[in-house]
Amino acid sequence: MATSSSDVLVLSVGVVLAALYLFRDQLFAASKPKVAPVATSKLVNGSGNPRDFIAKMKEGVSTNLFFPS
């Protein structure tokens, strides 16, 4: 079966649109302003050691715990 020019045109438009969709982050990233990540107050103050696992765990524990007696 012979392909017509309209079939080729529809397929090529589909391929181009699919490629634009897949690479939209790289193609249109220049128009978006880059946002710098916001550091937490512990890291800004310098009081947090990123390698101190025990301190990280203590910061994550809530002080509003109710223990049944």
Image (cartoon, grey):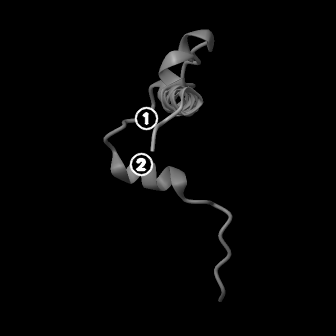
Q: Amino acid at mark 2?
A: Ala
Q: Amino acid at mark 1?
A: Gly
Helix, strand or loop at label 1? It is loop
Q: Residues within 10 Å of mark 2 (few under 14, many from 20)?
A: few
Q: Quadrant of residue 65?
A: bottom right
Q: Nearer the viewer, residue 28 or 8?
A: 8
Helix, strand or loop at label 2? It is helix
Do the residues under discs 2 and 1 have CB atoms within 8 angstroms? yes
Q: Is residue 62 left or right of residue 16?
A: right
Q: Nearer the viewer, residue 43 or 5?
A: 5
The earlier-in-sequence mark between 2 and 1 is 1
Q: Position of residue 67 (x, y in %)?
A: 64, 80
What residue do we see at 68% from left, 64% from top?
A: 64
Q: Position of residue 33 (x, y in %)?
A: 62, 12
Q: Which residue is mark 2?
A: 55
What residue do we see at 65% from left, 89% from top?
A: 69
